[in-house]
Amino acid sequence: MKISEILKNKRTLSFEVFPPKKDGSDELEKLYKTIDTLKTLGPDFISVTYGAGGANVRGASEIAGYIKSRGLEPLAHVTGGPSSHKDIDALVEKLKSLNVENVLALRGDKPVEYDAEYCKHFKHASDLLQYISKYGFCAGAACYPEGHTESETLYADLANLKTKGESGAEFFITQMFYDNSYYYRLVNEARKIGITAPIIPGIMPLTSVKNISRIKTMCGSTIPLELRNMIEVYSKDPEAMREVGINYAAYQICDLIAKGAPGIHIYTMNRPDTAEEICKRLKCVIDGYFTA
Ligand code: FAD
């Protein structure tokens, strides 16, 4: 089913997984078990990341196919990056053959050192959205509550977000954030300039110190003082740090739902136990406020 259709009737609960970092059927089997566990939490869709230019994609399409075969909706990420039109055709045709109906169109992360030629064919996600429109997927795209790191201002980034909507994005999923006011500002400002598609907040539970350095290098999301203080105190105790991260994510979700978010997307980092714990703590919120 198309995610745009689901969003017309209910709030969505979704999870993100990534292909295994190492080769080997054991790794894939482990991920399939993760997906089976996530299924028990009743998600509306599960997204599968895809590295730009085909990096870190071990079995990404097959993983999307597996999700579909388990009776769930996959959201396959497709990155333009350095890919050619032929590469994209091959990837999306494969997704079509696996009955995948939803894609998240992205430019993809650029390598640290890149030249202007890197995104020769698909300079931006909007170019990819336009190109794949002929395939009839329900397409989504990414957005950034604190503005994308390459944009000078949030407003410059929002103008480009509008182009993504006009190029076919029917919903957006946000970059992770730890201060919900950035999300509310993004939604307010987007509506003011005529962006009407649902904007699904992306939540990444900060359960270990390792995640924190990842966030700093990956996307520079602001970590509010309150959370930073808790990290200072609890980071030496992994169990306590995990509890803090899960509670903080649960708090963010309660607040987002109370203020009208159209769904929640959890970056699971392939850790089903974290998603399970959040869903367990929020059972009444999920049962009562996500249903049709
Ligand atoms: P774009 O929309 O092209 O934006 C990149 C920059 O260019 C922004 O500053 C934007 O304002 C500007 N811009 C956009 N359109 C135009 C235009 N028409 N003219 C001028 N400027 C423009 N990366 C991966 O490699 N694989 C993944 O699977 C993946 N999944 C992600 C999922 C989510 C929900 C999010 C939020 C990010 C994901 N990323 C992934 C990271 C993403 O690829 C990077 O953030 C990347 O730097 C930007 O991708 P984009 O699709 O937003 O690019």
Image: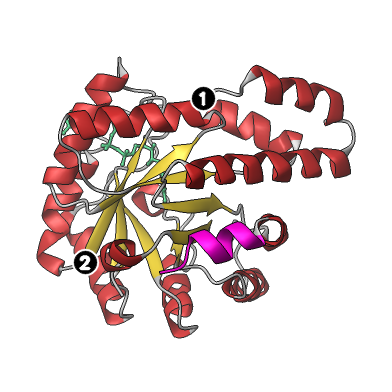
Asked which quadrant contains residue 282, the reply is bottom right
Q: Main secondary structure of the magenta part?
A: helix
Q: Position of residue 260 (x, y in %)?
A: 41, 45
Please state if 266 lies on the left or on the right of 143 as rendered. right
Gap between marks 1 and 2 measured at Cα: 31 Å
Q: Which residues lie in the magenta part? A: 283-292
Please state if 59 lies on the left or on the right of 37 as rendered. left
Residue at image location 69% in from the left, 21% down from the top? 226
Q: Is ligand 1 closer than 8 angstroms to the Cβ of mark 1?
A: no
Labels 1 and 2: the sequence-earlier one: 2
Assign the C terminus to one quadrant of the image: bottom left
Amino acid marked by disc 2? Phe
Q: Nearer the viewer, residue 229 or 157?
A: 229
Q: Position of residue 255 (x, y in %)?
A: 55, 40
Whether residue 122 is visible here, answered yes or no, is no
Assign the N terminus to one quadrant of the image: bottom left
Q: Which mark is residue 137?
A: 2
Q: SS of the residue at dot 2? A: loop
Amino acid marked by disc 1? Gly
Q: Which mark is residue 220?
A: 1
Q: Is residue 206 magenta?
A: no
Please state if 238 lies on the left or on the right of 281 as rendered. right
Please state if 119 lies on the left or on the right of 51 as rendered. left
Q: Nearer the viewer, residue 228 or 185?
A: 185
- The correct choice, above or below, for 234 with respect to 265 in the image is above
Q: In what quadrant does ligand 1 lie?
A: top left
